[in-house]
Image: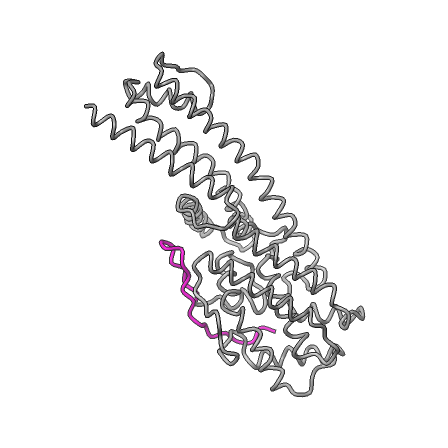
Amino acid sequence: MVVVRILAFLAGAMLVFYVVQAAVRTVVVPRGEQVGLTRAVFLVNRRLYELWCRRKPSYEAREHLFAHYAPVSLVTLPVVWAVGIIAGFVPMFWAVGVEPWQEAVADSGSSFTTLGFARQQTLFSDLLSTAEALLGLGMVALLISFLPTIYGLFSRREAEVLKLDVRAGSPPSALVMLRRMHAIGGLEDLEDQWADWEQWFVELEESHTSHPALVFFRSQRVTSSWITAAGTVLDGAALHLTSIDVPTHPQAAITLRAGFQSLRTIAAFYGIPFDPDPASNDPIRIHRQEFDLLLDELASAGIPVVADREQAWRDFAGWRVNYDTVLVALCVLAEAPPTPWSSDRSDGFVRAHVRHRWIVPAPETGPSW
């Protein structure tokens, strides 16, 4: 019997340790880590929301429902942590003499919530109650610090996304962005904007790997998304560098590099496979015909387009190949709304729910402009 109590105590202690370290790694550790318990909560909730969304007749209704997925999952986490800690302390209380099991459950719940409605007059049970109460207070402190941090980062991210809606439409596109900038005479003076977006990409990489739940937070407008905004900026910078006959600034190239490195880091966190060193002539999910149609649209808006379109295409494809796969895969992961040259390329992507990895075949798509 003593051996059974010792084993029960150790099993409970291991469960408590697992839950606490999962909470600390999710909230406190600055480097993004794959936390099994956190991932399980989000995957289960995602499956439930996907099944629920299938019952909705319209895209707007599904989008409105799915907007609750990330916040609900985030609030579910502390509930799961609390249940795990309470469950872990039950066999520990039983092991030190709190019987029957119902009393052990009452003691554990009373201690974690610090309500004090149950108390056993033994030294070991009092020590366990004190330890569990401290853990309960610690979980509350983590939650108090966690949620404001998440929403602060979300707010900073969305400020730039909403600004892009003004410049590039909603859903955004590189074509609209370049046409609007040309209309106000700002096509040759984009240095400050590229610098702002470089900073946005740097913050995006840090925040969306340290707090991966942010990937699933929806934008304020149903036609906008952080990942389609990223794709629009990257395509706009690539077109500005390769296809428009105006003086360019190296800041555009710096922003491009910061952007695709940011998306690659986020993709790597989620186990999305990609080639870290692609060849410049590797296939991309943009067809040459689409590229030519876009240049025709730019030229019809009065934007000076380079004469050598063949070289422009090779240069553009050489930039796009660095982020083509991860951009489209992250659009699938984030359930991004339909957007030209990003989420509209997602046909044929398959998600493996169990391993949370993404298998990325190259789909065939037609012109979208």
Q: Is residue 263 above or below residue 101?
A: below
What residue is at 52 percent from the left and 76 percent from the top? 366
Task: Give the extent of the magenta segment.
Answer: 349-369
Vertical side of 230 occupied by 97: above or below: above
Extreme residue in the right direction: 185
Q: Nearer the viewer, residue 310 or 299?
A: 310
Q: Pinpoint residue 44: horizontal percent, then vertical percent.
A: 40, 46
Where's residue 344, x and y in %? 53, 67
Instruction: Give left or right: position of 278 versus 16.
Output: right
Furthest toward the left, the residue is 1
Instruction: Judge whether residue 363 is colored magenta.
Output: yes
Colouring: one colour
> Is residue 30 left or right of 189 when viewed as pictured?
left
Q: What residue is shown at x 54% (from left), y 52% (from top)?
A: 208
* Quadrant including the N terminus: top left
Position of 139 relative to 355 (above/below): above
For residue 164, what is the image quadrant? bottom right
Q: Which residue occupies 33% across, 18% down?
A: 103
Q: Quadrant of residue 189?
A: bottom right
Give the prevailing secondary structure in the magenta stretch.
loop
Q: 52 or 177: nearer the eye?
A: 177
Residue 181 relative to residue 320: left or right: right
Left or right: 228, with 87 as reference point: right
Instruction: Give how far across and how far down residue 134 sits, in percent.
Output: 47, 26
Residue 230: in magenta span: no
Location of the C terminus (image quadrant): bottom right
